[in-house]
Amino acid sequence: MSLAADGLPIGLRLVVETHLELCPACRERVAMLRAVGGAVLEEQPAAAMREDALGRAFARIDMLEQRDAAEAAAGRPATRPRKALAPPPLPAGAMWPRALADCPATRWRWIGPGMRWSRVTVPGAPEANVFLLRIDAGKYLPQHTHRGTELTQVIHGRFHDGRALFGPGDFDLADGEVHHQPVVQDGSECICVAAVEGRLHFDGLIARWFGSLVGM
């Protein structure tokens, strides 16, 4: 509902949109909620606008056009072609989420035996804390809870955190009431995209130190 109402912070929104790519039932539900929201909006009384609203809108457009023309004249084109950004390599069968198509990501970085991570940068939103985790079969994250909200979307492999088994397409929400330890199941490594509002709070001191280094 928050996504349909455009009320999610950008990092959480990207993870939920990644989930929608893999869940037809949730796509239908979001479409229904947006339709309901549109119907409710149509029933609201019209809001009076300022008499000069149209003129102010045209004036803003003129200002943008003048700025672009000035930048072009100075040799700084207003729109520069964006360099293609290759996502970190994924195993066969794993697809890079379309929701992250415009988000550059770092190479895989070592954070522990059998564990790597990649920082995802959200253009125009430096506050968004989004990252990928890649953990080998049989390995696990240290036990932790959360100082805020964590959304995790599995895009490859499976893990069990003591509450449930999560596989490709599955989505998890955790907060300060959840204390868990995700363990990757045998047979395949696990890759997840996650967004955190706040921080993870690891039980062990070493894990806390590593978490602070990578922004978890």
Image (cartoon, grey):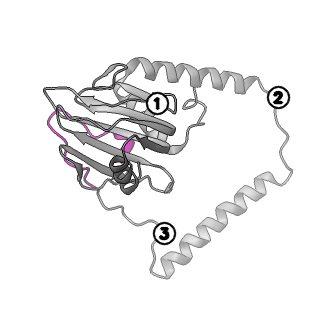
Q: Which residue is mark 3?
A: 78
Q: Based on the displayed image, in which of its 4 quarters is residue 109 positioned?
A: bottom left
Direction from residue 42 to residue 25 in the image, left or right = left
Direction from residue 193 to residue 8 in the image, left or right = right
For label 1, the SS is strand
- Residue 79 placement (x, y as % from top left): 45, 65
Is-magenta flag for residue 32? no
Q: Which residue is mark 2?
A: 45
- Residue 68 placement (x, y as % from top left): 54, 70
- Residue 23 placement (x, y as % from top left): 37, 22
Up-down: is 196 above or below 20?
below
Three-letter amino acid code of the residue under disc 3: Ala
Considering only order in the chain, which callout, 1 or 2, is on the residue closer to the N terminus?
Answer: 2
Is residue 102 visible in the rendered image? The answer is no
How many angstroms separate mark 2 from mark 3 (CA)?
40 Å
Is-magenta flag for residue 96? yes
Residue at (40%, 66%) from the top-left corner?
A: 80
Residue at (19%, 42%) from the top-left corner?
A: 90
Closer to us: mark 2 or mark 1? Answer: 1
For label 2, the SS is loop
Q: Residues within 10 Å of mark 1 (few under 14, many from 20)?
A: some
Up-down: is 92 above or below 32?
below
Considering only order in the chain, which callout, 3 or 2, is on the residue closer to the N terminus?
Answer: 2
Q: Residues within 10 Å of mark 3 (few under 14, many from 20)?
A: some
Three-letter amino acid code of the residue under disc 2: Pro
Judge by depth and name the residue closer to the eye, 109 or 17.
109
How many angstroms separate mark 3 from mark 1 (CA)?
42 Å
Q: Which residue is mark 1?
A: 174
Up-down: is 54 above or below 162?
below
Span colored in magenta: 85-101
Judge by depth and name the residue closer to the eye, 180 or 21.
180
